[in-house]
Amino acid sequence: MKKLLISLLALLTLPGVGNAQVSGIKVGYCQGEAGTFPSTTDSYFSDMSVQKKTWTSGAIRLKTAKLNAMKGNEIREVNAFLASKLNVDSLAVWVSATLDGEPLSTDTITTQVKGWNTVALTKPVSITPETDCLYIGYSYHQKSTSKAMGCLTTKQVEGYSCFTRSGTDAWKDCSADYTLCVEALVYGDNLPKYDLTLEALQVQKNYVVDKGKLLLTASVYNAGTVTVNSFDFVCSISGISEVYTVHCDSTIAYDETKTIEFSIAPEAIQTMDPDNRDVTVTLEQINGYADENPTDNALTGNFLITLHSFDRHVLLEEFTTEKCINCPRVAGYVHDAMQESEFDGRLYTMENHVGYYTDSFTASFHRDWEWFFDNEYAPALMYDRHAEKGAATAVTSASSKFDLYEQIRQRLREPAFVSLKVKAAVDEEAQTIHVTVTGARAKEMFTINAPRITVVLTETNLKAISQAGVSTDYWHYNVGRRVNSAWGDVLEWDGDNYTYECTIPYNKSYVMENLGILAFVHDYDATDKTRCEVANSAAITYADFESYSTGIHAATGAAGQQPRYFDLQGRELSAPVHGLNIVVRGKEVTKVMIP
């Protein structure tokens, strides 16, 4: 089954390709996807896999709603997926009205393959007006340990199904966790022409009223014999009388799935009462016709409502070490992203020198953050410490620069509900940097747990000592040097505002012009690596630092007045020079460090 991603936000009208030449269609729940044997950490499947000289069986149940559009046709073949053929000496497919009754039809093959096996039924099974339930199944004979049953661990469509049995034991309903990879192949003169399935629906988690758009992503599967060229997404929102219709001109052939992004503007929502709503999306007007099997055309999702949000800045953390031969490749992707205009001012990066051993740049808090790993490796990345749905950790990898850029873009789409403004003042005498972070929140509960703030002193443009995988000079960027606390401090609020202060020591070996302050507000759950997401971040460089003792800083002074530049001896300069400059604007005198 071919899967494509398109966006209605920039969708071109595609030419029609006419009716597909389809003689038969597949009916099931896996939509042609390849499966694997269920996890043997489950004792049931572990015991099943080690049985000897026995039959192992699996089946799906096709209910009335699934069969209605197929009536007047017949099942002539069964598609059965084997995740392995090791120790399997025969495969039987069958169609039955009940799990324990005699099959309506069955056939056996003794030469099977790993993957899909299409077995013709000597006796086709008619789907009559009276047919309200059928089980489509397969059984394989295993000589010894075998993990041949193919299942998907997530449902593909509503109504997914998986029944299993080892030997003559009772059937077990595993539908809550698995979809069995088996399909009926239906042929006849009454196959449905127009039959779309809404397989999945993703709804933007937060709808921001002052942004005015709600983004939705739908996966649409064509189970009809006619190639679809157009259809409508009809969207209704709980508590709102208006219906929002988005027309889609997109070509979807039989047995093809397309994932389509589109948006609606629910202007009727102007308050946070209630602060969450449901949206139901229904597929209608398939090539201008009604869907012949509308039972699988609608899905519902939920979204939260907030009145306003702040600009999001993405925090990209890189796990890297000088002993890692592959790290320079991904570090190159990260550095290129830092130069991209589309991410300018919206992307902050930090290197954590752990993951594949350690090196001379490893800080103690880098080791604390090894907790995020399931299995340590490098190069590795975290985007706002966000974990994808179903993932055990926020740590991930980048297969390409394109993949890395897409992950950043995805995070930038997410609204931020807290702001940060960072100030830093250097106390050279105490050899410390005093940091003040101020900000506000757009809503009270923008994290699961009490929000925390972490402040990191970074140093950039650090020449590598002995970087593996390169033959020329190599530089590290924005390496984490010191931190207020590895897991941050809980923010204290004054209404919807906060002010946070901390003092961070620095080492005289650091190059002052290369220092920066990175601050980020985040969630934290010591028992769950997926609940530590960064809500927003901010960073400044040394050029923005102030002098703690005098208050003289690198700001350029009163707007609209021409600056005059002087060196430390009081000599006037024609232009600022590298190093420390005295800048005079009217009555205002400041110091500016030019890196």
Image (spheres, grey):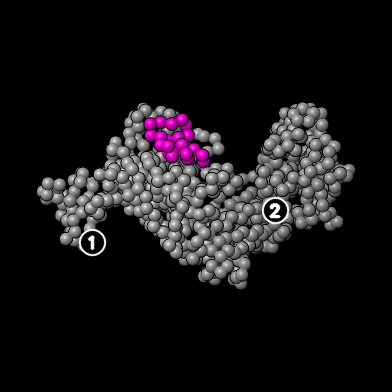
Instruction: Give x and y (percent) for residue 108.
Output: 82, 35
Instruction: Give x and y (percent) for residue 123.
Output: 85, 42
Residue at 43% from the left image edge and 45% from the top image edge: 485
Task: Assign the N terminus to one quadrant of the image.
Answer: top right
Residue at the disc numbered 1: 559
* For discs 1 and 2, the disc positioned in front in the rendered view: 1
Residue at 41% from the left image edge and 28% from the top image edge: 468
Camera-side residue of 148 and 166 = 166
Considering only order in the chain, which callout, 2 or 1, is on the residue closer to the N terminus? 2
Q: CA distance from mark 1 to mark 2?
A: 62 Å
Relative to 559, does residue 364 appear above or below in the rendering?
A: above
Residue at the disc numbered 2: 158
Task: Assign the C terminus to one quadrant of the image.
Answer: top left
Instruction: Give x and y (percent) for residue 361.
Output: 38, 34
Residue 13 circle label: none
> Magenta stretch containing residue 363, yes or no?
yes
Instruction: Give x and y (percent) for residue 139.
Output: 80, 37
Q: At label 1, which amino acid type do we have?
A: Ala
> Magenta stretch containing residue 212, yes or no?
no
User: Which quadrant would residue 234 be assigned to in this image?
Assistant: bottom right
122 displayed left or right of 563: right
Q: At label 2, which amino acid type do we have?
A: Glu
583 displayed left or right of 522: left
Residue at 60% from the left image edge and 46% from the top image edge: 390
- Magenta span of residues: 352-372
